[in-house]
Amino acid sequence: MTRTPSKHLQTFVFLALGLAALVLLTACASDIMKSYIGAPINSVMLDYGPPDNVYDLRPGERAYQWRQDKTQAVSGSTSGETRRTRHGERYEATETPGYVQQTACYYTFYTHFSGAEWYVTGFRQPSFECE
């Protein structure tokens, strides 16, 4: 007996494929951070405001860090299947509730002092959830 996927499963697969395509088309945070290498740290500050933390590392080296709280709503879902019992058919549904997910994302740039300014020399790779 061949069984066709339920309408809910088809919708879920379509949405998952759309989301995957969107993720591939958008720039990753690390790609944006990479574009600042060689620029004065003031360029980052002009785009994102003052850093949340500044750490002195070695003489002439600093790390500047920004924190961004990322909040996303994860929708719930309902699925089910029809089961045969000796009393007839019965639909059994399974519900997964939605929830709000919060993640603290840290973006850190490493700099070197040259002349009268601090220049970006590298960055720390953001966590996967923050890309």
Image: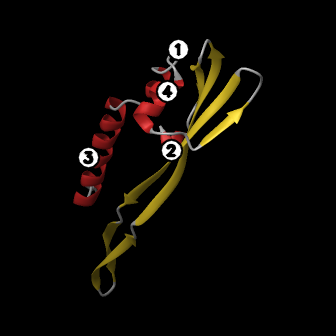
Report the disc number at residue 120: none
Residue denoted by label 4: 42
Q: In which image quadrant can residue 20 be found?
A: top left
Give the CA separation, mark 1 to mark 2: 26 Å
Task: For the N terminus, give its image quadrant.
Answer: bottom left
Tell me if label 4 and label 3 are in contact, CB under 8 Å. Answer: no
Q: Which residue of the protein is positioned furthest toward the bottom in this rendering?
A: 87
Dot 1 or dot 3, earlier in sequence: 3
Q: Which residue is mark 2?
A: 129
Above or below for 125 versus 87:
above
Q: Earlier in the sequence, mark 4 or mark 2?
A: 4
Where does residue 16 sit, x and y in percent of width and height?
33, 46
Is 80 left or right of 29, judged from the image as shown?
A: left
Residue at the disc numbered 1? 38
Q: Nearer the viewer, mark 1 or mark 2?
A: 1
**Is residue 2 among what the camera can see?**
no
- 10 Å crowding of disc 4: few (<14), some (14-19), many (20+): some
Frontmost residue, 15 versus 59: 59
Q: Earlier in the sequence, mark 3 or mark 2?
A: 3
Specify the label residue 14 is tagged with: 3
Q: Amino acid at mark 4?
A: Asn
Q: Earlier in the sequence, mark 4 or mark 3?
A: 3
Q: Residues within 10 Å of mark 1 (few under 14, many from 20)?
A: some
| Image location of residue 77, percent across then percent down | 34, 65
Which circle, 4 or 1, is nearer the viewer? 4
Residue 43, quarter of picture: top left
| Front in this rendered view, residue 62 or 26 | 62
Rate crowding at label 2 as few (under 14), some (14 to 19) or many (20 or more) other CA atoms within 10 Å: few
